[in-house]
Amino acid sequence: MLGLFSLPGMILLVSFSGFAAFAAQSGIPMAQAVFMTAVIWALPAKVILVGSIVSGAPLIAAFLAVTLSSIRLMPMIAALVPEIRTRETPTWALLLVSHLIAITAWVMAMQRVQAVPRAHRFAYVTALGLTLTLSSMTLVALVYPFVATFPPLVAGCLFFMTPVYFLASIWSSARQRVILVALVVGLAIGPFAAIAFPDIDILISGIGGGTLAWAIERAWRKREERAA
């Protein structure tokens, strides 16, 4: 529960206020906006889905867009699960808790889980994810009637707080040099990808940044091995 009142938790709630405004202005009913918060969870994926609905995109196109935007969560789950599982933890439980993990929950968990005894880590991460999810659902339901009149600029600013925080948090919590390199390279590629390929700029920045970071890190390791 304390995680909700931390800086990451408060920024997440502010961002979901922006999502509620976006959903209301797009004509998405409150019940559907709350349902999206529960079953999709990751904020960018919900924004993509609402945008697809508003633009009249085919169902398969919306499905693929949301799926591709959520694939980025798979490496996060792969990094977190070894930290929280024990021999007694059933696979189905790990699959369920994985649904609760988006970037905010992942960053908070990775920063704090080492201080939690291993026997209690699964319960800690589950409680953290449930708290953030249920609180976001509640917030969307409460503010939905009031945010429909927000100017687009205000809603955009609320959204923008989340990626800025994510970048700062991932940078500060990175345990490997390659993560820092991937962030720098991805940010450098981003503006050029947005100009050249505006429809898939994030995908290109992510794949390009990650691939180049891997190549740079591999070259560094080979040089260090030769020097040793």
Image: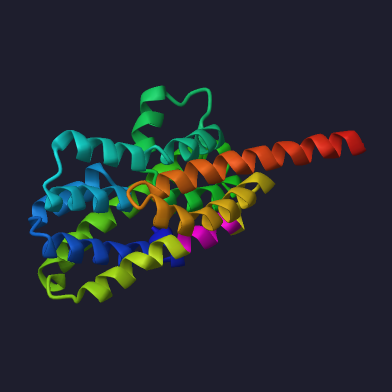
Q: Is residue 161 visible?
A: yes
Q: Residue at x 54, y 48 (%)?
A: 110
Question: Where residue 72 sits in the image (x, y, percent)?
Answer: 43, 41
Q: Quadrant of the C terminus?
A: top right
Q: Residue at x 19, y 66 (%)?
A: 21
In the figure, 158 relative to 48: above or below?
below
Of residue 188 and residue 25, the one placed in the foreground of this image is 188
Q: Main secondary structure of the magenta part?
A: helix
Q: Is residue 176 visible?
A: no
Of all residues, the one furthest to the front in this rendering is: 196
Residue 215: quadrant of the picture: top right
Q: Residue at x 31, y 53 (%)?
A: 43
Residue 211 is covered by the magenta coloring: no
Residue 61: quadrant of the picture: top left
Residue 184: quadrant of the picture: bottom right
Question: Where residue 104 sits in the image (x, y, percent)?
Answer: 42, 54
In the figure, 87 relative to 128: above or below?
above
Residue 167 is covered by the magenta coloring: yes
Taking the image as shown, residue 177 lies to the left or right of residue 143, namely: right
**Residue range highlighted in magenta:** 165-171
